[in-house]
Image: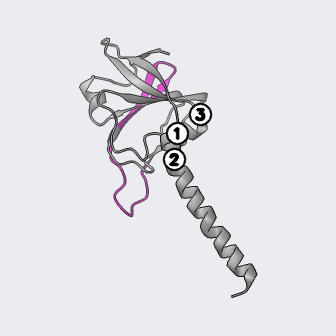
Amino acid sequence: MSCGKSYIILASVLFLLFSFITEGALAQEFSYAHATVITPKGVSIPVEVSDTPEKRSLGLGKRDKLEKGWGMLFVFEKRIPHSFWMKNMRFPIDIIWLDNQRIVELAENVPPPQEGESPKVMEPRLPSNFVLELESGRARALGLKVGQKLSYQF
């Protein structure tokens, strides 16, 4: 094998290794602001705020669980139909799309992908600028429904 081909192979392996290490490290390095989401019945849900493209891309992926009673609130600049997928998810969740404070769509008990399966993609019909992820079954337990309004304390 020529020196040039060896260099290309070595560079490719190092790039893949660096990418893998960096992606795993991101989950540990992010610092999330905390906020509170309040349901119509007055239940307070502490949330991690996912407000950058990198945080939104990772979401709850690569975690073994969501802290009991907590959620993750995704904050977007644009009101569009934000698609969500279950890449690198290890547990089922409820996904709630909000147009400002009004719930416009719910996906309950969304399972993580099985090994070898492509991650499921949820494509809402309506635009939103916030998305709330909760532990599976929590939306139903809280009585959340399309049309209700949630409030936020940042």
Residue of label 2: 25
Residue contact at pointers 1 and 2, CB within 8 angstroms: yes
**In-image side of 114 versus 48 (left or right):** left
Q: Nearer the viewer, residue 129 or 92?
A: 92
Residue of label 1: 29
The residue stretch that appears in magenta: 94-120
Q: Amino acid at mark 3?
A: Thr
Which quadrant would residue 110 be assigned to in this image?
Answer: top left
The percent coordinates of residue 145 (x first, y second) are 34, 24
**In-image side of 78 versus 2 (left or right):** left
The percent coordinates of residue 78 (x first, y second) are 62, 29
Which quadrant would residue 141 be assigned to in this image?
Answer: top left
Q: Residue visible at 73% across and 86% down?
A: 2
| Pointer 2 local density, CA inside 10 Å: few below 14, some 14–19, many at least 20 | few
Q: Is residue 106 magenta?
A: yes
| Circle nearer the viewer, 3 or 2 | 2
The secondary element bearing badge 3 is classed as loop
Rounded to the nearest whole Å, what is the CA distance between mark 1 and mark 3? 13 Å
Residue of label 3: 52
Q: Amino acid at mark 2?
A: Ala
Q: Is residue 2 magenta?
A: no
Rounded to the nearest whole Å, what is the CA distance between mark 3 and mark 2? 16 Å
Figure colour scheme: one colour
Q: Which of the two discs, 3 and 2, labels the residue nearer the N terminus?
A: 2
Rounded to the nearest whole Å, what is the CA distance between mark 1 and mark 2? 6 Å
